[in-house]
Image: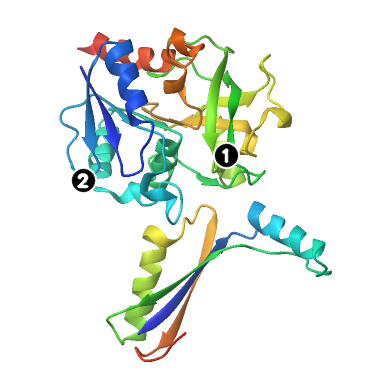
């Protein structure tokens, strides 16, 4: 079982994700350079947060065309696990591995704070350690997290159960006030139809250790590790 | 041949930047601005002088990279020979 964290020019949460996998969960973990078109045999691939290519053109647009993304696409199509966090989620959208697009936050402000997330799916490789209806607290830090797609596409996404996390109140109520960026239907995280590719705007890697005062993010990584160890 | 590609948010989608700019315009006294769409413009110099080939190539560029067609529309405008400034 091997984990890989992709490093794009401008990634800045790569070391945090590496630290959680390598030191908190004691997994064999390596960095994957954006210019390589191989995943070096990694079973779990993380696209980390940051500002790949300085957010030139659109957040994630340039990174989506980098050589490593061809390998990520093949890995995803073969059922391999891919987790995109914040900028990594934006890259997955731009690469077409997840549906929809991000726009500037409705407030036009960079939002950096803790939010609450209602868990909608607990049967995925990344969420099997969570409970149905559980509310997680996680930090966000982004200017482009305003998720959007055509209404009929959003309906299809919901019908297929691909909405995994929604911004909510601490009690789990999905309200406009709990939505930090204007995202359609309070969507904070989605998966592909097969459930092996997950993208979310909040940062689970920033809340996966007791010393940080919050461990709500650890379950995402621990779920994936448990799934991969079971099939080994 | 030179060309200009314009990319802007789709009409049916709320454009937070455009709305903020519209509000700012009315604050500084430009009454009667109903709507502002904030987009991007690209000036592109191409090796070809064939307008049909140029337009096809530019549209492919838009679909592949310059625009995100989930939330953006684009238009392509050919500006003529290499010596012509847009």
In the drawing, what numbered circle is on residue A91?
Answer: none
Specify the quadrant that holds the C terminus of chain A.
top left
Location of residue B56 by image quarter:
bottom left
Measuring from the top left, give residue A143's x and y in whole percent: 55, 42
Q: Quadrant of residue A204?
A: top left
A219 sits to left or right of A135? left
Q: Quadrant of residue A195?
A: top left
Both marks 1 and 2 on one chain? yes
Whichever of labels 1 and 2 marks the residue nearer the N terminus, that label is 2
> Which residue is labeled 1 in the image?
A154
* Residue A35 image label: 2
Q: Position of residue A215 (x, y in %)?
A: 47, 11
- Which image quadrant: the N terminus of chain A? top left
Question: What chain letter is assigned to the residue under label 1?
Answer: A
Chain containing mark 2: A
Residue at point 73%, 30% (across, down) = A177
Mark 2 nearby-residue class (10 Å; few <14, some 14–19, many ≥20): some
User: Residue A134: where, in percent of width, then height?
Assistant: 57, 12
Q: Is residue B15 visible?
A: no
Give the CA separation, mark 1 to mark 2.
34 Å
Residue in view at x 41 percent, y 49 percent: A54
Mark 2 lies on a secondary structure that is loop
Q: Position of residue A83 (x, y in %)?
A: 37, 28
Which callout, 1 or 2, points to the residue nearer the camera?
A: 2
């Amino acid at each position: 079982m091997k984990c890989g964290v992709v490093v794009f020019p401008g990634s800045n949460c790569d070391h945090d994700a590496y630290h959680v996998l390598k030191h908190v969960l004691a997994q064999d973990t390596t960095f994957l350079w954006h210019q390589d078109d191989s995943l070096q045999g990694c079973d779990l691939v993380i696209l980390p947060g940051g500002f790949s290519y300085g957010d030139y053109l659109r957040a994630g647009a340039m990174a989506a065309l980098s050589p490593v993304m061809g390998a990520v696409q093949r890995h995803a199509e073969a059922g391999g696990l891919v987790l995109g966090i914040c900028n990594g989620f934006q890259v997955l959208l731009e690469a077409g591995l997840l549906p929809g697009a991000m726009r500037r936050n409705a407030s036009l402000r960079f939002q950096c704070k803790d939010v609450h997330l209602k868990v909608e799916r607990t049967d995925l490789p990344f969420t099997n350690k969570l409970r149905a209806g559980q509310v997680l607290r996680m930090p966000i830090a982004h200017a482009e997290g305003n998720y959007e797609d055509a209404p009929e596409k959003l309906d299809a996404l919901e019908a297929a159960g691909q909405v995994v996390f929604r911004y909510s109140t601490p009690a789990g109520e999905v309200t406009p006030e709990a939505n930090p960026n204007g995202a359609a239907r309070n969507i904070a995280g989605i998966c592909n139809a097969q459930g092996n590719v997950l993208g979310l705007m909040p940062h689970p890697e920033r809340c996966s250790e007791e010393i940080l005062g919050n461990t709500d993010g650890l379950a995402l990584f621990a779920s994936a590790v448990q799934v991969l160890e079971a099939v080994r | 041949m030179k060309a200009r590609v314009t990319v802007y948010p789709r009409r049916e989608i709320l454009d937070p930047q455009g709305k903020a700019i519209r509000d700012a315009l009315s604050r500084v006294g430009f009454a009667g601005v109903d709507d502002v769409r904030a987009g991007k413009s690209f000036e592109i110099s191409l090796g070809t002088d064939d307008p049909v080939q140029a337009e096809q190539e530019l549209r492919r560029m838009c679909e592949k990279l310059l625009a995100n067609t989930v939330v953006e529309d684009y238009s392509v405008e050919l500006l003529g020979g290499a010596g012509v400034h847009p």
